[in-house]
Amino acid sequence: MDSFVPTAGTVVRQWHVIDADGKVLGRIATEAARLLQGKHKAVYTPHIDTGDHVVVVNAARIRLTGRKPEQKLYRYHSGFEGGLREERAKDVMAKNPVRVVEEAVRGMLPKTKIGEAMWRKLKVYADGQHPHQAQVTGSNPAKAAARSSAKTADKAQARTKKTNDNKREVA
């Protein structure tokens, strides 16, 4: 019996919506990172991107525990000498709450090309509205698996027919 190793073409991706309203930042980030990496799936393979798409809504209403709003610093550099800039978490939350969630999740993903691909499947929105409703409602895992197996069966039939036609021509 052979072991099953998923390939990029065999991975069935779903869409997950996480509502961050009143939840702690780290809890949301770990859940999103787990879904993006595909660790919740039985076919998880570390060297293949088996993860799903994740939509985080209500990022503006996320909570930071303790004194993190005053003490946590977000650093970025302009590229020029002395260009290191620091902002407190409460200031970043006021200006761009999406950045707080994105950076928290990105820090939990691998720092490789596969990690970049995983991060691109993360969509964060400050309010409750998002433009991915069609993907989210259309992501029934049973239907997606049936579609995938039907496509595979169709390809196998086409290959068999093609080889049979070739045999007829030769004979």
Image (spheres, helix red, strand yellow):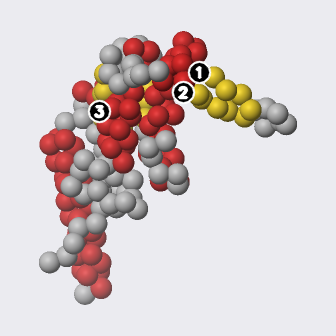
Sequence-wise, the earlier of marks 1 and 2 is 2
- SS under mark 2: loop
- Residue at 45 percent of width and 46 percent of height: 109
- Seen from the viewer's position, the closer of residues 142 and 63 is 63
Sequence-wise, the earlier of marks 3 and 1 is 3
Residue 157, quarter of picture: bottom left
Q: Quadrant of the N terminus?
A: bottom left
Q: Which mark is residue 39?
A: none
Q: Is residue 141 above or below residue 2?
A: above
Q: Is residue 113 above or below residue 26?
A: below
Callout 1–callout 2 Cβ contact below 8 Å: yes
| Number of dots carrying numbers | 3
- Seen from the viewer's position, the closer of residues 132 and 118 is 118
Residue at image mark 3: 16
What's the amino acid at mark 2?
Answer: Lys
Tell me residue 54's x, y (percent): 36, 34
Farthest-out residue, bottom? 171
Q: Which mark is residue 72?
A: 2
Whether residue 98 is visible, yes or no, is no
Residue at image mark 1: 88
